[in-house]
Structures are given as C-alpha cells and as structure tokens.
Image: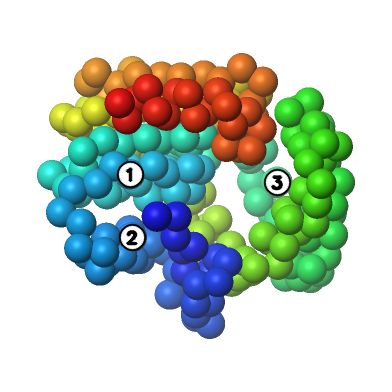
Amino acid sequence: IAPDLRGHGASDHPSRPQDYSLDLFEADVLALVDDLGWDRFVLLGHSMGGMISQAIAVHDSGRLDGLVLMDTVPDAPSVGGGAAMLVFKVAARVFGMKAMARLLRKPPPGSPDSVKRLYAERPGYGEWTRSKVLATSPLMALAVMAELATLADRVPELRSLDLPVLVIAGEHDIRGFVDGSQRMADAIPGATLAVLPGAAHNPQLETPDALWASLTRFLD
C-alpha cells in the first residue's frame, strides 16, 4: 500500500496551515492501517516519509514486523541551510508551484549522473516529476519545511527499537542524508545499512534493481 499523504497527490489538500504536521501525517498513516484491518505490517518510509516512519516505530513499534528507512534523516535535514529554505519559501509564495514545476522539466543543476540518466532515458520522466509538484499543496510544503527545520534529533529514541530495521541510502544523496543514515544504522540495535552505488535521493527510480534486491533480502 503506497498512500498519498494529505497535501500530496490525489489526497485531500486542506486549506489551513495547522492541518499539516508530522504528527498529523503519523496519525493518518496509522488510521489507514486501522482501516485496512492490519494488526502487523512492515513500514517503509522514504525521505520525509522516513521521518514519519521513525515516529511510528518509536511510538507504536509493537505493530511493526520490520522498518525500512530510505534516504532520510533522524533530525533537521541539511539541504543547503537556511538560504535554500528561504529561496524555496520565496519561490513558492511569489511564483507558485507551476513555476517551480517548470524548472523540473530538466535535471536540476548539479544533479548526479543517476538523475541525468533518468531524464535522458526514461520517456516522460521530466513531465512526471512536474506533475508531482503540481499535485503538491504549497501550503503543506511551507508548513512542513518550517517544522522540519526545528526537528529534534531522534537518535536517542531510535536506540530503544527492538525490531528488524534496514537503512538504505543512495551513495550520491545529499551528504547530510548519507551521514544521517549512517547515524541511524549505528544507533539502532541490529540495523543493516545498505548504501546503493550509483543512486542519489530516489533509488526506487535511479537504481531500482539494486533497491529491490536489498529490500527483498531484508523482507525474506
């Protein structure tokens, strides 16, 4: 089951900033699991989804048969510092998501080879990326980015986990995400770290075979 969180994709886009937070995302995921009637499940969280998944594991680990944290961090993400966040906020408010989406029709400056290859070899990839941005609430993006900037370090809580955990990172992801993955793998008892060669922030797209091999080994 791969849900769109609130403010993403085809899910509802509430119109108030207070309707977006990591706590609400966590509650939504657990409500979905309850609706599916699942007593136990394996949870995979990617990027911000990994931060939500960490919270679920800490608060409700008894429901998890396993946890996969992919290209995520245990604390405030380092994505270029406050300047990058300021640029994003100004762009989102002044130009809107449509203008930002147009920028993603081509590989962003400084993209690793794995990302450039997706644009070059996967038909329609640029348009698909653009459509994802257009299906994202700018209000959600602004509210959550502000919260992420103040996120406390969750490593002390992760040390108490007692379940199978796989931590995945693309070798070319942002340095802070690779370092954060290492910190989580070191902190969680028995956790396995898989650094995928040739991948950046989205191994499911950039190196799908390597990701699938790592994931299925863990699930087996």
Q: From the image, tell me which residue sits under label 3.
A: 83
Q: From the image, tell me which residue sits under label 2.
A: 29
Identified by mark 2, the residue type is: Val
Identified by mark 1, the residue type is: Leu
Q: Which mark is residue 43?
A: 1
Check the image and report above or below for 66 versus 144: above
Identified by mark 3, the residue type is: Ala
In this rendering, position of residue 112 left or right of residue 169:
right
Q: Position of residue 71 (x, y in %)?
A: 51, 34
Give 28 or 99, whichever is nearer the viewer: 28
Q: Position of residue 209 (x, y in %)?
A: 57, 27
Q: What whole-number distance in Å separates the C-alpha atoms at marks 2 and 3?
A: 32 Å
In this rendering, position of residue 174 left or right of residue 76:
right
SS assignment at label 3:
helix
In this rendering, position of residue 202 left or right of residue 24:
right
Q: What whole-number distance in Å separates the C-alpha atoms at marks 1 and 3?
A: 33 Å
Q: Position of residue 189 (x, y in %)?
A: 22, 20
SS assignment at label 1:
strand
**Tally of numbered tags:** 3
Identified at 43% across, 75% down, the residue is 19
Q: How dense is the environment of label 1, judged by Cα within 10 Å: few (below 14), some, or many (20 and up)?
A: many
Sequence-first tag of 2 and 3: 2
Check the image and report above or below for 80 versus 198: below
